Image (cartoon, rainbow, N blue to C red):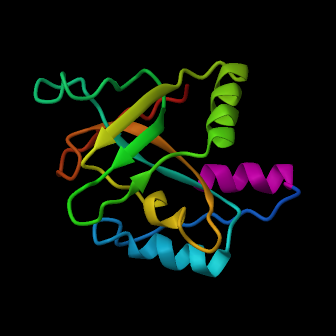
């Protein structure tokens, strides 16, 4: 987010942009909901990790890998207790794919059941918020040895 903030400082976008770091994602996504209520955005882009499938325990479950670029979340649904998930806004999905192609950034696609991210509830705030989720492939999520590839693409 600091990198994005520096870019926005140089570019001076026409729209108001809020960069929000949230807490309590693992506890009903409460931090993101409060931020959305305060900012009242038209668009929300969530940055998170996605589970990489390049380990023996997940190789048949996920088709996202470290070192092959960021991932565009195409769908997620938790199903246990929350019955919620995110279906990204088609226009934002198209824009992300177009931008990645234009900038020659490899973009993986990710979909999962049993997972929620901040945009799951953010998209339901107000009259609805167009949502998009981008993720960094990660191995061993929620452990002391979580790994992401930090090389720029």
Q: Quadrant of the N terminus?
A: bottom right
Q: Tell me which secondary structure the magenta stretch mostly adopts.
A: helix
Q: Quadrant of the C terminus?
A: top right
In the displayed structure image, the side of residue 19 where residue 58 appears, left or right: left
Q: Out of 134 and 125, give the one closest to the viewer.
A: 125
When the figure is inspected, residue 17 is found, relative to residue 64, above or below; the finding is below
In the displayed structure image, the side of residue 6 where residue 137 appears, left or right: left
Q: What is the tally of numbered marks visible in this picture? A: 0
When the figure is inspected, residue 114 is found, relative to residue 38, above or below; the finding is above
List x then y, in percent, for residue 60.
Answer: 18, 22
Q: Out of 54 and 89, give the one closest to the viewer.
A: 89
* Residue at 54% in and 62% down: 123
When the figure is inspected, residue 125 is found, relative to residue 11, above or below; the finding is below
The quadrant in which residue 112 appears is: top left
List x then y, in percent, for residue 79.
Answer: 25, 55
* Residue at 73% in and 62% down: 17
* Residue at 46% in and 66% down: 121
List x then y, in percent, for residue 4.
Answer: 65, 50
* Residue at 62% in and 81% down: 38
Q: Which residues are magenta?
A: 1-13
List x then y, in percent, for residue 48.
Answer: 43, 49
């Amino acid at each position: 987010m600091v990198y994005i903030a520096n870019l926005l400082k140089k570019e001076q976008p026409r729209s108001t942009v809020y960069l929000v770091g949230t807490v309590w994602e693992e506890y009903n996504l409460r931090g993101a909901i409060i931020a959305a209520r305060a900012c009242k955005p038209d668009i929300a882009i969530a940055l998170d990790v996605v589970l990489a499938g390049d380990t023996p325990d997940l190789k048949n479950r996920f088709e996202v890998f470290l070192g092959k670029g960021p991932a565009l979340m195409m769908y997620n649904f938790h199903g246990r207790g929350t019955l919620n998930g995110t279906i990204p806004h088609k226009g934002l999905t198209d824009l992300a794919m177009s931008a990645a192609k234009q900038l020659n950034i490899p973009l993986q696609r990710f979909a999962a059941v049993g997972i929620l991210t901040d945009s799951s509830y953010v998209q339901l705030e107000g009259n609805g918020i167009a949502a998009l989720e981008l993720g960094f492939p990660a191995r061993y999520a929620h452990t002391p040895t979580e790994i992401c590839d930090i090389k720029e693409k």
